[in-house]
Image: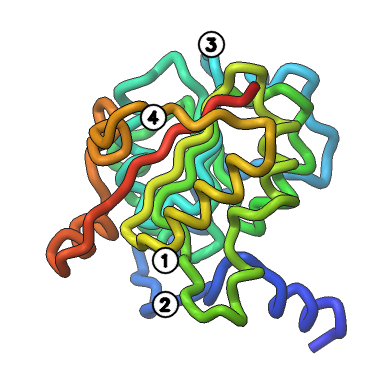
Amino acid sequence: MTEERRKRTAEAFFGRRHGKTIRPMQAVALADVLPRLRVDPGVPAPANLRELFPVPVRSVVLEIGFGGGEHLHHASGTEPDTGFIGVEPFVNGMASLLRMLEREPRDNIRLYDDDATALLDWLPAGSLDRIDLFYPDPWPKKKHWKRRFVNRANLDRFARALKPGGLFRFASDIEHYVNWTLLQTTRHGDFVWQASTPDDWRKPYEGWPGTRYEAKALREGRTPAYLRFVRR
C-alpha cells in the first residue's frame, strides 16, 4: 500500500468500501450501468452543470452518501425537472441503487462512487441548488470527530458550490452529531438555520420517503432531526 493510499484511508470521511458479498445481478449493474452514469472529475466540469443530464432540468441537487438509495431514487422520480448527483463510496449501497435504476431508470441521475470532497472541488462555483447529507457516519469516538463530514473545510466547499439562497439539508438520529452540525454551521457564517419552532426540525422534509437507516433508528428509540440551512 502506498503512502498516499494510507493517508487517504486514514483521513477519509467514509468508512469501509465493501460489506456483504455482491450478488451476481448487482455485479452486472455495477459493470454495465454505473459507467454510463458516473461523473468524472478528471475532465473539466461543464460551465452549466445542467448539461450533465440528457434531459432538461431546471435545478441541480447533490446528495452525499445516499446509502441504499431510497431517498435519491424516490426524489428523482417525484422531481423529474431536477438533476440529481448522488455520491456513495460504499459499493453495496451503490449496487442497491443501480438495481433500482435497472427496474425504474432515471434520466435525471448522475453518480459518483468516491470521496465527495473531490466532486465538490470539481463543481463550478454557484452551480448547486441544494446539498443533502442524510444520516452520515457519526464517527462517535472523539478521536474520530475530525472525520465527520460536517466541518469548516467542507462547509467552505458547500458555500462555494451552492447558489446564494441554496439549501443545505442535514438529517441524523445522533443527538451529538445534530448539535455538532448546528454549532459548526452557525459558526461558519455563510449559512442561516431555518427554524423557529421545534416542529421545524422534528418534522421530516416534505415528500420524505424515509430510509432504511431512519427506520432502524426509530426501531431502536432514537429520534431523528431534520435541519435546513440557507446559503446567504
Q: Earlier in the sequence, mark 3 or mark 2?
A: 2
Residue for badge 2:
19
Residue positioned 57% across, 22% down in the render: 166
Residue positioned 25% across, 40% down in the render: 202
Q: Nearer the viewer, mark 1 or mark 3?
A: 3
Residue 104 higher or lower than 32, as above or below: above
> Amino acid under label 2?
Gly
Q: Secondary structure at mark 1?
A: helix
Q: Residues within 10 Å of mark 3 (few under 14, many from 20)?
A: few
Q: Quadrant of residue 36?
A: top right
Q: Secondary structure at mark 4?
A: loop
Q: Earlier in the sequence, mark 1 or mark 2?
A: 2
Alpha-carbon distance for marks 3 and 2? Answer: 36 Å
Are discs 1 and 2 less than 8 Å apart at CB?
A: yes
Q: Earlier in the sequence, mark 4 or mark 1?
A: 1
The one of 96 and 148 positioned closer to us in this rendering? 148
Q: Position of residue 225 (x, y in %)?
A: 32, 47
Label disc, if present, on residue 195 of the rendered structure: 4
Alpha-carbon distance for marks 2 and 4? Answer: 37 Å
Residue 20 higher or lower than 49, as above or below: below
> Amino acid under label 1?
Asn
Alpha-carbon distance for marks 1 and 3? Answer: 31 Å
Residue for badge 3:
58
Residue for badge 1:
92
Residue positioned 66% across, 20% down in the render: 163
Are discs 2 and 4 less than 8 Å apart at CB?
A: no
Q: Nearer the viewer, mark 3 or mark 4?
A: 4
> Amino acid under label 3?
Arg
Q: Position of residue 66 (x, y in %)?
A: 44, 50
